[in-house]
Image (spheres, rainbow, N blue to C red):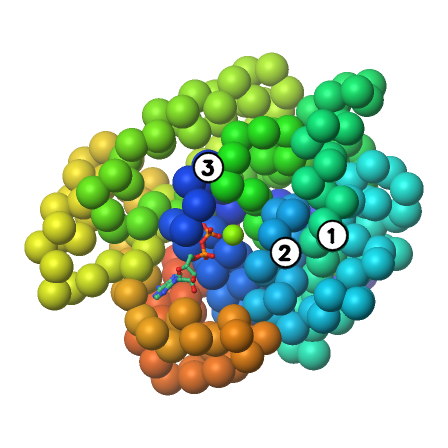
Amino acid sequence: MTQSITPRIIAVANQKGGVGKTTTTINLATALAAVGKRTLVLDLDPQGNASTGLGVDHDQRSRNAYHVLMGDISLDAAVQDCKIPNLSIVPSGSDLAAAEIEIPELDRPQFCLKESIEGISGYDFVLIDCPPALGMLTINALVASDAVMVPLQCEFFALEGISALVKTIERVRKNFNQKLEIQGIVLTMFDKRNNLSDMVASDVREFFGEKVYETVIPRNVRVSEAPSHGKPVLLYDHNCAGSKAYLHLASEVLKRENRSAA
Ligand code: ADP
Ligand code: MG
């Protein structure tokens, strides 16, 4: 029975803003859905960019990730279809900003999301789009996940701050979630005309070794235009370099999954 499948839950996290977390969440999710994997995007960023990028209007967010996180409603009650086969979303809500302050008041504050989505089934993948901070929302995402995917922008300061993220991942693993692994590092916004991009990419590969995906997401104007149309780039222009890269990333993710399952 397909309904009983336990999903692979992946947090897309980096405390820096503007590194491609949301773009990677939306487009990797769409690419996985396109190859038949039932995929759920959980938008845990109060800014709600993943919800907007997947075409969820603001007036359709009355039941959202905040209510799931706080245990007010079930996950199923907040899930919406995205008009894309195999792809669903739990949208963000502006209340999520308050959750950073409210969560620490609760019992077992690191486990709110985990407890709310415990037993989730019927999906192959759940991708959690994290906010640009290492606060309680990101901690909750890491505690609830099997793995974390880290987008790194090919810019000079890419590795700056990464040690804080790695330390947070290690702390979560030690204290709250022993199974948490680094799913992979994905280099984003690579500009082949810029030597710096190459230098950053080789530094990151030296530092993280084979955790870094071979696929590099190029800087591509079609990728940045797509969200304003409420569409993933794969639907906006499926032939552009950005679409091809995200499809390639999805195939690498699936390859790694099969290898670790074997
Ligand atoms: P984050 O979620 O980490 O804050 P976003 O995914 O929102 O980052 O990306 C930041 C900005 O960069 C957005 O305007 C997005 O459209 C743009 N962007 C992301 N990836 C690419 C890319 N590969 N090519 C061009 N623009 C990109
Ligand atoms: Mg974002």
The kind of residue tagged 1 is: Gly
Instruction: List x then y, in percent, for residue 70.
Output: 83, 37
Side of 177 where 74 appears, left or right: right
The quarter of the image holding the N terminus is bottom right
Residue at 41% in and 51% down: 18
The image's mark for residue 15 is: 3
Mark 3: give few (<14), some (14-19) or many (20+) Cα within 10 Å: some
Element marked by disc 1:
loop
- List the residue tagged with mark 2: 48
Q: Name the residue: 29% across, 65% down.
A: 219
Which of marks 3 and 1 precedes in the sequence?
A: 3
> Would the CB of label 2 be found within 8 Å of ligand 2?
no
Does the CB distance between marks 2 and 1 fall below 8 Å?
yes
**Residue beneath the point at 88% across and 48% down:** 74
Q: Earlier in the sequence, mark 2 or mark 1?
A: 2
Q: Is residue 83 something one can see in this rendering?
A: yes
User: Mark 3: which amino acid?
Assistant: Gln
How far apart are labels 1 and 3 at the CA level?
20 Å
Percent from the top left, x then y, of residue 253? 45, 55
Task: Give coordinates of residue 94: x percent, y percent.
Answer: 72, 50
Q: 143 or 210: nearer the eye?
A: 143
Nearer to me, 115 or 159: 159
Going from N to C along the chain, the mark reached first, 2 or 3, is 3
**Quadrant of the rendered image containing residue 61:** bottom right
Position of 178 with respect to 65 (left or right) is: left
Is any part of residue 262 visible from this angle?
no
Q: CA distance from mark 2 to mark 1?
A: 7 Å
| Image position, residue 175 (x, y; %) | 60, 15
Q: Label 2 sits on what residue type?
A: Gly
Q: What residue appears at the point 68 percent right and 31 percent down from the top-left corner? A: 100
Residues under numbered marks 2 and 3 in contact, where contact means CB atoms less than 8 Å apart: no
The residue identified by callout 1 is 93
